[in-house]
Image (cartoon, helix red, strand yellow):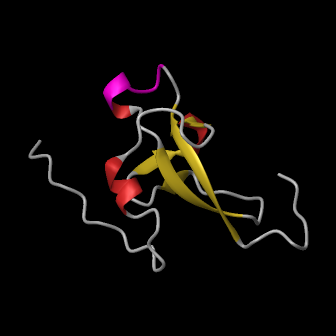
Amino acid sequence: MIIQDTMPATVLAVGRLMAGTAGESRRSAHLFDLHSGGSHPEFLHARCGAAMPYDHLEWVPVGSGMPCERCLGLAGSADQTRLPRPSRGV
């Protein structure tokens, strides 16, 4: 990652799980707020609250892939409040 003095502290990126790491229904495109510090945690949290392993993510251009509706709902959120995750009852 190239770091410049004019680079914002966080960058909005679109990512999804790589093919082969999850079924197609779980490969929706999520919004991530990435910090420009260069390092990253093992798991990244999307705006919707989903935690995904950094090594299993692929970064895609805006408009690519099936969008995560929860992330889209929070796309314009100034405070970036996360929605509660639904219970799966598993």
Looking at the image, is 30 positioned above or below residue 38? above
**Is residue 19 within the magenta segment?**
no
Q: Residue furthest bottom?
A: 79
Answer left or right for 60 relative to 46.
right
Residue 62 x, y percent position in the rendering: 59, 43
**Is residue 24 within the magenta segment?**
yes
Answer left or right for 52 relative to 48.
right
Place residue 60 in its image quadrant.
top right
Q: Residue at x 24, y 58 (%)?
A: 85
Q: Residue at x 88, y 55 (%)?
A: 2
Residue 48 x, y percent position in the rendering: 37, 58
The answer to whether residue 44 shows anywhere in this view is yes
Place residue 73 in its image quadrant.
bottom left
What secondary structure predominates along the stretch shown in magenta?
loop
Q: Residue at x 33, y 49 (%)?
A: 69
Residue 54 x, y percent position in the rendering: 58, 45
Looking at the image, is 59 positioned above or below residue 79? above
Q: Which residues are magenta?
A: 20-25
Place residue 67 in its image quadrant.
top left
